[in-house]
Image: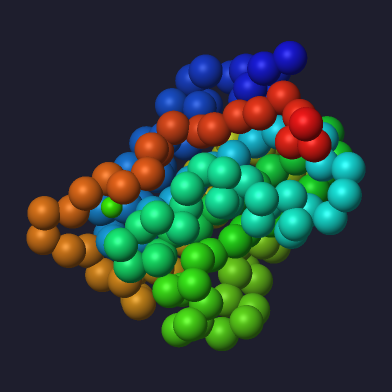
Amino acid sequence: MGLSDFIPKDDQTRITEAITMAEKRTSGEICVHVTPKCRGDVMEAAEKKFNKLGLYKTERRNGVLIYVAYKSKKFAILGDQGINDVVPDDYWHDEKETLGKYLSQGKPADGLCEVVSQIGDALAAYFPPVDNDVDELSNEVSFSDDDDE
Ligand code: CA
Ligand code: CA
């Protein structure tokens, strides 16, 4: 079981490109994590992964994690402290709706690309691009076999 069972290689590349494009519009960092199963609360699992992947390490605390447990049909979008301090509580509402729609249609890659782009736009309003931007977190899709391990 690997990421390619859920998202083919070409689509993984597409998602990475979408992240790269989105990060040109903002100093924020967007990460996508995919796992088959999430047995418990998806927000808790996403928070754990957020820390494990080091998303809290960005200079402006403006990392966003899109977490998808595809077999469990659960997902979460989680922003770091710097974002939560400035945006309203339901800030990711549209993005969640979009992603949920695509996932239920069995189009995870299309959904992730679309949502990554939307998040880039949303982040740009509060975190515009900076000179000498650093890619603080990898744009590759991250994967784990079992997040409950
Ligand atoms: Ca960056
Ligand atoms: Ca990045």
- Residue 122 image offset from top left, x and y in percent: 43, 69
Residue 99 in sight: no
Q: Is residue 78 above or below residue 38?
A: below
- Choose top left, top right, bottom left or bottom right for residue 77: bottom right
Instruction: Give the residue furthest to the top.
Output: 1
In the rendered view, how is the structure colored? rainbow
Q: In this view, does 127 lie above or below 34?
A: below
Q: Observer-nearest residue: 38 or 98?
A: 38
- Residue 81 image offset from top left, x and y in percent: 49, 72
Where's the C terminus, which quadrant? Answer: top right
- Choose top left, top right, bottom left or bottom right for residue 69: top right
Residue 13 in sight: yes
Residue shown at the point (40%, 66%) measured from the top left: 61
Q: Observer-nearest residue: 49 or 111?
A: 49
Residue shown at the point (62%, 82%) measured from the top left: 89
- Choose top left, top right, bottom left or bottom right for residue 3: top right
Instruction: Give the residue furthest to the right.
Output: 39
Where's the N terminus, which quadrant? Answer: top right
Q: Does 1 sit left or right of 113 as displayed?
A: right
Instruction: Give the residue furthest to the left.
Output: 131
- Residue 39 image offset from top left, x and y in percent: 88, 43
